[in-house]
Amino acid sequence: MDGRLPLEGLRILAVEQFGAGPLASQLLADMGAEVLKIEDHAVGGDSARPVPPYALPDNDSYYFQSFNRNKKSVALRIRTPEGKAILRRLVPKADALYANCRGDAPEKLELTYKHLSPYNEKIVCCFLSGYGMTGPRAPEPAYDYLMQAYAGIMDLTGEPDGPPTKAGVSFVDFSGGFISLVGLLAALWEANRTGKGRDVDVALMDGALVQLAYMATWALNCGYVPQKFSRSAHPSMVPAQNFETKDGWISVLCLKQSFFPILVERMGMPALAEDPRFKLAQDRFENRVVLLDILERAFQEKTNAEWTDLLQGHVPFAPVNTVAQAMEDPQILARDMIVEMEHPAAGTMKVLGPPIRLPGADMKYKRAPYLGEHTREVLGDLLGMEDDELEVLREKNIVSWNTPPEG
């Protein structure tokens, strides 16, 4: 391997903010794409720049740094006629435009393939929005938690007698971003094959619904009405849930028949595997209350460490870690999931690395850019704009640039 990254030579114009879109384009940048982050300096750029509670100087934050490494920032007001004209001059230099916005924004901002193909017939225009570009709610703003509520996911989450509950992370945002990458890369492959690009329309709402998977199929075909089970239990497989131990919690999932006899043998209760009440998956499902009472009392007799020694390598299980504990786990460290990058104000900053391993590729991690840090570089190198032309545009507040502090 020569150390090259697979997406080197790919250039993306990213009109994005907050987490869903920026996480997706960050993965493109990690894999070698040149991501030009287009930001409106008149409103402070990406709305995620100052997100609390861990702010950094110069309109920056640890939140923003989590989603925008390896990118270039171009401060350009594309809502103005002059800014729109500059963006269209960039389109022939790019392979794709990627935007996360409201569903009606691409048409309003004239970012669709219909508007941009006269300047580059191969351009792929990928849009990630809350409700998609069609339907009555397309123009509405949408966020992860709203999608969890709207798709029925909150109704599935939490303890049986508790209120509807959101997941602890913004998984609809992040999975929506990754889904959009599949569409974007598929359309780029098509453009390379046919010479023509297209629009790609991805909705967080659709991505949330897809994660209902078999539950949606059950509801659509069998009249299934979901119910909540205590301790994050699986709706149909037993035992598959969290169990309290002597000093914490572990999660055990016997999703295959072969695992249950191994589990109870490792727990010192091998007779349970031959008990007619628990022998097969359907038996365990019908007698779940009795079986879980036995297992719950047994799990409380040992610590997490003791159960790890007994179960690891034999049945699927995991300790229920805190975030801090997860960051120190040997498996996570062995996968190089924590990487470092240098920041002028924060020094050496640790962040999560990309979830894709590329053996032999020379992956590097550069901090997220300051607002407009690369405006002059990009417009000068790609469009041949001279300093005096850029100065005129800056005086008119069409573009802006920023020199980062010395680190």
Image (cartoon, rainbow, N blue to C red):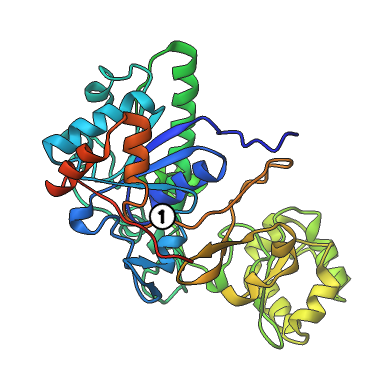
Residue type for callout 1: Pro
| Residue 135: x %, y % from top left | 21, 37
- Kindly state the secondary structure of the residue where label 1 is placed: loop
Task: Identify the residue at horizontal 49%, vertical 13% (top origin).
Answer: 193
| Residue 346: x %, y % from top left | 48, 72
Q: Which residue is mark 1?
A: 369
**Direction from residue 95 to residue 16 in the image, left or right:** left
**Direction from residue 27 to residue 260 in the image, left or right:** right
Question: Compared with residue 204, is residue 298 higher up or lower down, i.e. above or below?
Answer: below
Q: Which of these two is toward me, 284 or 24? A: 24
Q: Which of these two is toward me, 295 or 306? A: 306
The answer to whether any part of residue 202 appears in the image is no
Residue 306 location, quadrant:
bottom right
**Direction from residue 179 to residue 124 in the image, left or right:** left
Task: Identify the residue at horizontal 20%, vertical 40% (top origin).
Answer: 78
Number of numbered discs present? 1
Question: Compared with residue 188, is residue 291 higher up or lower down, i.e. above or below?
Answer: below
| Residue 309: x %, y % from top left | 85, 74
The answer to whether any part of residue 356 appears in the image is yes
Mark 1 crowd level (few <14, some 14–19, many ≥20, 10 Å Cα): many
| Residue 300: x %, y % from top left | 72, 85
Question: Compared with residue 199, is residue 375 higher up or lower down, i.e. above or below?
Answer: below
Task: Identify the residue at horizontal 34%, vertical 23% (top origin).
Answer: 92
